[in-house]
Amino acid sequence: PLKEVLERQYSRHPLWKEFQFPNKPEKSLRAATAQMNKNLVIDGWQSSKQYISWLQKACKMDCFGKLYRESDEKLCTIFDDITKHVPSDLLRRQLMSLSRSPEAFLSLRQHLARSLACTSISSYILGIGDRHLENFLLSKNDASLIPIDFGYSFGIGVTMLQYPELIPFRFTRQFSNLLQPLDHHNKGFFSHTMIRCMAALRAQENKEMLMNTMQVFMNEKLIDWDVSHDSQFNTIRVKDDTSLKTELELRNQNPTSTSTTAADERINVAALKLNGAHPVSILSAEVKLRDHCKNAIYFRYPISPNIQDVIDVLDRFLLRHNDNHGNSKNKIRTDLHISNREEQANLWKEQVVSVPEQVHALISLATDPAILLRQYYGLRTHV
């Protein structure tokens, strides 16, 4: 698991004491080092402690939505302070430890970058979320990255979780630093591989094949889709054996439930992505679907952010990155909807961008500090 890889390299880092104990006297380091090596977890890192402490003060951990009303400048400053406690070269050091020569290191890095690029694009198209460190495996043979656990797919991370996942995939500092100096400002091997992968998926013949494959979910819908749209599930909050049984019974009793609408919406989202609509336009439309999912089993506490606050964050993101993807602000819209996609067909066509623009917008979303710090803290986006 990627988490164990980073933890192991962190404990061996020549400067880890400075990262972990910036204000501790030298005499306390021996006992602290022994304890750290005995029970080393990312949650015990100085950065994570600072992150959780700040969250408790900022929103008291009972209303995560307050983060969306904080200024972006303040969040970017806090994010920089938190990341100072995390060495940015942990993954690079892991690959160096597997390499017998500089040529071997470059080969391993290329394998990792290629696998990361392809899995990132695939995850975006299929709406796969929950990309925390334990959901990646790293091959010791060729350093290929292997994603696991696809429970949160088809945009569930955006529409049904308490904390909407606004990042399209994981591309945090450990990945970006590994690819330096070849990848800089969204230009390099990683972004070029993503562009080639996205171009292949957007090709007409491949797009039709993917859409035909995904049509199976119109007939065999996920239980989550039933729960999110059917008002009969108002009392269900935790997915245990009893609630699962209840869900299945109600599904059999109501074969024509509104879950068909949920399936349509998720297939439409995938179609918009394959058609090349701007990622922010799609993301803002997905966020609006949260109104339909208030009965979802993942909404256990009333602490989710206000939908308009999330849209405002995306609007400010467009202003910050307007020059990066070469689109005018008037062209990129955050007021479109998935449910009436056919009625807004002409407007959605205006949101279509080129493959490089689409990829660069995705990378910008995945690396923007104001977006990263607003994600669920379990994702550890600062690592």
Image: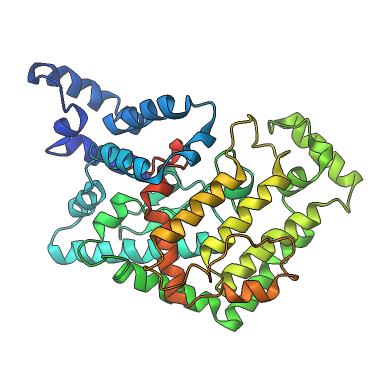
Check the image and tell me how it is coloured.
rainbow
> Which residue: 81% across, 44% down?
230
Check the image and report above or below for 17 versus 342. above
In the rendered image, which quarter is residue 262 located in? bottom right
5 relative to 236 in the view: left or right:
left
State how many labels appear: 0
Picture layout, residue 257 above or below residue 50: below
Q: Is residue 350 above or below residue 316?
A: below
- Point out the image quarter for the C terminus: top left
Instruction: Using residue 216 as the reference point, say whether residue 28 is left or right of it.
Output: left
Residue 98 on image: x %, y %:
21, 53
- Would residue 99 be visible to someone looking at this image? yes
- The part of the image, by quadrant, that contains residue 53 is top left
* Image location (x, y in percent) of residue 316: 46, 54
Q: Is residue 151 visible?
A: no
Q: Is residue 83 above or below residue 110?
A: above
Residue situated in front as seen by the camera: 216 or 124? 124
Residue occupying the far front of the picture = 330
Q: For the view shown, which residue lies furthest in the left direction?
A: 26
- Look at the image and tell me in which quarter the N terminus lies: top left
Which of the two residues, 114 or 272, is positioned nearer the viewer here? Answer: 272
Q: Position of residue 127 (x, y in %)?
A: 57, 57
| x 8%, y 21%: residue | 26
Decide which of 118, 63 is in the foreground and name it. 63
Residue furthest right in the image: 253
